[in-house]
Each structure stands twice: as C-alpha cells, then as structure tokens.
Image (cartoon, helix red, strand yellow):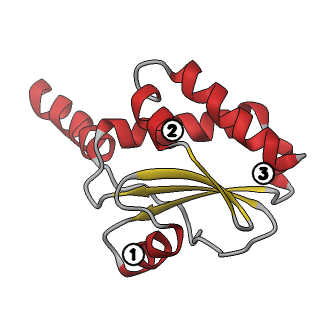
Amino acid sequence: MAIRILVCLLLPICIVSCNTKHDNGSASFEPDAEYIQIVLFHLEKRCATCNAVENETLNVLEKHFQEEVKEGEIRMVAMNFQDSEGKKAAELLRASGQTLFVVKGDSITDLTSEAFMFAQTHPERYHAALMDALEKRLN
C-alpha cells in the first residue's frame, strides 16, 4: 500500500519534470523591432544544453534586466527551428540550427558559441557575454 501511494505521488512529478517542451506564450520574432529580442532557436526535442541556455538567459534577465523586460525593452523569444514559424524566422536571421541571437533592428549578435559551450558548465561566462551584448544594445 505504501509503495502505491509513493508511486502515485512521484509519478506526476516525474512526468512534469521530464517534459522538455517549454511554454513561452505567444512570443514570436518581430523583424526590425525597436526593442531587443533574445532569439533562441531549438529543436522539437530539447537537450539539457538547450534547456540550460534558456534557463540561464532567463536568470540573467530576472537578475539584471527586470525593469527592461517589464518595460518591453528586452524580450526573450524561444522558437522551434522545425516548425513553420521557426523556419520563417530562421530564414530571416540566417540561422542554420540551434542558435542564440541578440537582435535589435538590423543588428544581430550571434551568441551561439558562448551560449551552448558555457550555459550548462560555466554559466558565469555565458552570463557575461549575454550581459555585454544586451548593454551594448540598450545604450
């Protein structure tokens, strides 16, 4: 009986925690926007590194750029590279797979290397690169 209760309690937690699909609302890439867009292209099935990139990006925004996010000056856009909307945005930005860009107007900073190399293992290095790119666009 105790095992059944334990299974009933733990099963929903496992199902939710193993789900790799993130709900980012209705955010989508807007070409030539006046605000900064952090655009993360990911695949349908997301790996731990891709999830770390998104989580660490959100951590930086929450810790250092709360006001800019609140005011709409910075927006995070996570897009499935494999669906039609993601393919269209990837074509506009010339993305060829899992990538991370900081975009404002026609200015694009490619942070793919820093994001995917360091977000999971050395997040402080990724944080510094992202913060630098965002601060340059804010000024």
Q: Amino acid at mark 1?
A: Lys
- The dot on residue 19 is none
Judged from the image, the secondary structure of the residue bearing numbered disc 1 is helix
Number of residues whose C-alpha sits closer than 10 Å to that of mark 2, classed few (under 14), some (14–19) or many (20 or more): some
Number of residues whose C-alpha sits closer than 10 Å to that of mark 1, classed few (under 14), some (14–19) or many (20 or more): some
Residue 65 place in picture, x, y as percent: 79, 40
Residue 25 place in picture, x, y as percent: 56, 66
Q: Are marks 2 and 1 in contact (CB under 8 Å)?
A: no
Number of the front mark, 2 or 1: 1
Give the camera-side residue of 83 and 9.
Answer: 83
Residue at image mark 2 = 55
Report the residue at 65% width, 26% height from top: 128
Q: CA distance from mark 1 to mark 3?
A: 26 Å
42 relative to 107 in the view: left or right: left
Number of residues whose C-alpha sits closer than 10 Å to that of mark 3, classed few (under 14), some (14–19) or many (20 or more): some
Q: CA distance from mark 2 to mark 3?
A: 15 Å
Tag 1 or tag 2, which sits nearer the N-term? 2
Report the residue at 47% width, 39% height from top: 53
Q: Amino acid at mark 2?
A: Asn
Q: From this viewpoint, is residue 62 visible?
A: no
- Quick one: quadrant of the N terminus? top left
Q: Amino acid at mark 3?
A: Val
Judged from the image, the secondary structure of the residue bearing numbered disc 2 is helix
118 relative to 45 in the view: left or right: right
Residue at image mark 1 = 87
Report the residue at 32% width, 40% height from top: 17
- The dot on residue 69 is 3
Give the camera-side residue of 80 and 93.
Answer: 93
94 relative to 14 in the view: left or right: right
Q: CA distance from mark 2 to mark 1?
A: 23 Å
Report the residue at 65% width, 75% height from top: 31
